[in-house]
Amino acid sequence: MPGPKDLDPSSSPRAMIGAELRHARERKGLSQEQLGQVLFVSGSFIGQLEAGTRRMQPEYARMLDDALDTGDFFTRNCVAAAKSKHPEHFAEAAEAEAQATAVRQFTPLLIPGLLQTPAYARAVFRAYRPTEPERKLDELVSTCMERAALLADPTDLLLWVVIDEAALRRVTGGRAVMAEALRHVADVARQHRAIVQILPFEAGAHTAMEGSIKLMDFEDAPPLLYFEGVGTGRLEDDPSTVRHHRRTFELLAACALSPAKSLVLLDAMAQDYTHEEQP
């Protein structure tokens, strides 16, 4: 009986490796929970690997090859599955985001990546990487704009974002860039491609003052939570942790302006930036 084929990095390696994992597990007669016990992880983690929403790490690949008698298939091919255009700390979250059915996100200091304009994204990347060559910045901006294709009209993705007013007040890239960025966010909301709420300064202290959160739901896999810091990121699938931060997001949405009032604020601030830019 022939073994599984090597993955083609130009295709969808994580989806393919997940399909091979499911096939090998079922051939062994193991449930996701039983295989998870071998790897000292949860059954939901195995489900996420099979669905392609989690990246397979080399240490798990070796254990899977041993447990499922697949030679060195997963060890060899997890390298192809790990290739990404995104920064290492964000790659797994970006790939999961592309498969999500719903994304709920709170950002305290910047406009979320899916809602950024090219000029705004370039200003952010330039701030992160002050000595980066322009060619590399072009690649980063292009990758960011490719992510925004998830919001093509009509969109299958439910994107619900709560943006702190601080992100709108911080002049990133200049006032003209900010005016364009805020109009773009408002346009996306008006076209019903995202739910946008602004958390105003007057809301005072809130439940997520320590940082940003992103919750992702999937059709055939358990939800994921993504935390991000300066040059770092972590995916979390612990059910109680995900539930806790889902409640965090619900409280933020309750404290934020309504979508309609958020549009009014976005329009007013974009208009202010435009007037301030003019001599």
Image (cartoon, rainbow, N blue to C red):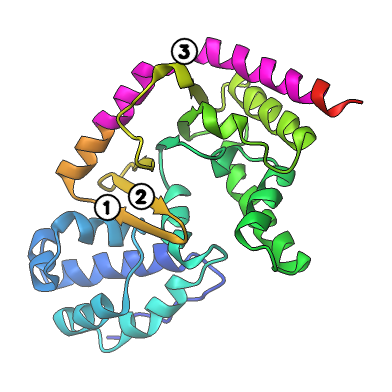
User: Is residue 70 found left or right of 155 in the rendered image?
Assistant: left
Residue under label 2, please give it. Answer: 227
Q: Residue at image x 51%, y 24%?
A: 196
Q: Position of residue 25 (x, y in %)?
A: 18, 69
Q: Residues within 10 Å of mark 1 (few under 14, many from 20)?
A: some
Which secondary structure, mark 3? loop
- Identify whether 84 is placed above or below 119: below
Q: Position of residue 42 (x, y in %)?
A: 14, 59
| Range covered by the magenta-colored residues | 247-274
Residue 270 included in the magenta stretch of the image:
yes
Q: Earlier in the sequence, mark 3 or mark 1?
A: 1
Q: Between residue 104 and residue 191, name the one nearer to us.
A: 104
Dominant secondary structure, magenta: helix
Which secondary structure, mark 2? strand
Q: Residue at image x 38%, y 21%?
A: 204
- Residue 66 visible in this rendered orientation of the protein: yes
- Identify whether 234 is placed above or below 119: below
- Identify whether 99 is placed above or below 168: below
Residue 39 included in the magenta stretch of the image:
no
In the image, which disc is placed on residue 258?
A: 3
Residue under label 1, please give it. Answer: 236
User: Dots 2 and 1: beta carbons under 8 Å?
Assistant: yes
User: Dots 3 and 1: beta carbons under 8 Å?
Assistant: no
